[in-house]
């Protein structure tokens, strides 16, 4: 994206981070007291900073990362999400 816009990569990443924070606040403020018939759970795999085989096992910000999603099936609304390592606690949604 920085090549297309001719902006510094750090600038593009700062803009994306800011947009993500705004989206998270909007989701937290607007998605309340839902009544949906079916909620689907899904997970998306990715890696951050370096490939998983290079990352240290205890590095929580690099390597293998998962996004856990709860989605209202018919409404296609993301009810909540969690981005973390794939541990039993994180998969079960245990709060920090």
Image (spheres, rainbow, N blue to C red):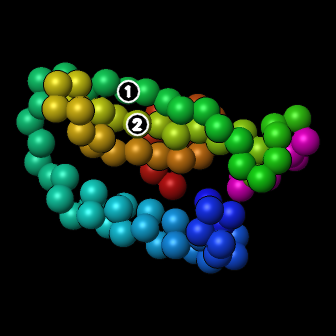
Earlier sequence position, callout 2 versus callout 1:
1
Q: Which mark is residue 41?
A: 1
Which region is colored magenta? Answer: 54-61
Task: Name the residue: 38% across, 26% down.
Answer: 41
Q: Residue 23: x percent and y percent?
A: 35, 62
The answer to whether residue 91 is visible is no
Q: Which mark is residue 33?
A: none
- On the picture, is 92 further left or further right than 65? left
Which residue occupies 27% across, 42% down?
79
9 sits to left or right of 82 = right
Name the image quarter holding residue 87. Answer: top right
Q: Residue 52 versus residue 94: which sits nearer the camera?
A: 52
Residue 70 is left or right of residue 65, and the answer is: left
- How far, Cα to Cα, is label 2 from label 1? 6 Å
Element type where label 2 sits in the image: strand
Q: Residue at x 32, y 66 (%)?
A: 25
State the residue position of label 2. 69
- Quadrant for the N terminus in the image: bottom right
Discs 2, 1 touching: Cβ within 8 Å:
yes
Would residue 40 be seen by someone viewing this image from the given angle? yes
Asked which quadrant contains residue 65, the reply is top right
Q: Is residue 55 magenta?
A: yes
Q: Main secondary structure of the magenta part?
A: loop
Magenta stretch contains residue 14? no
Q: How far across and down, in percent of the image, does residue 64 sit?
A: 72, 39
Which of the 4 quarters of the picture holds residue 4? Answer: bottom right
Q: Assign a secondary structure to mark 1.
A: strand
């Amino acid at each position: 994206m920085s090549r297309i816009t001719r902006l510094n990569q750090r600038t593009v990443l700062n803009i994306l981070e800011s947009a993500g924070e705004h989206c998270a606040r909007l989701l937290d403020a607007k998605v309340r007291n839902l009544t949906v018939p079916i909620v689907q759970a899904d997970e998306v795999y990715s890696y951050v900073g370096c490939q998983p085989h290079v990352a240290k096992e205890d590095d929580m910000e690099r390597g293998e990362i998962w996004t856990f999603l709860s989605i209202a099936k018919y409404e296609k609304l993301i009810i909540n999400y969690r981005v973390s390592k794939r541990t039993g606690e994180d998969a079960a949604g245990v709060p920090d």
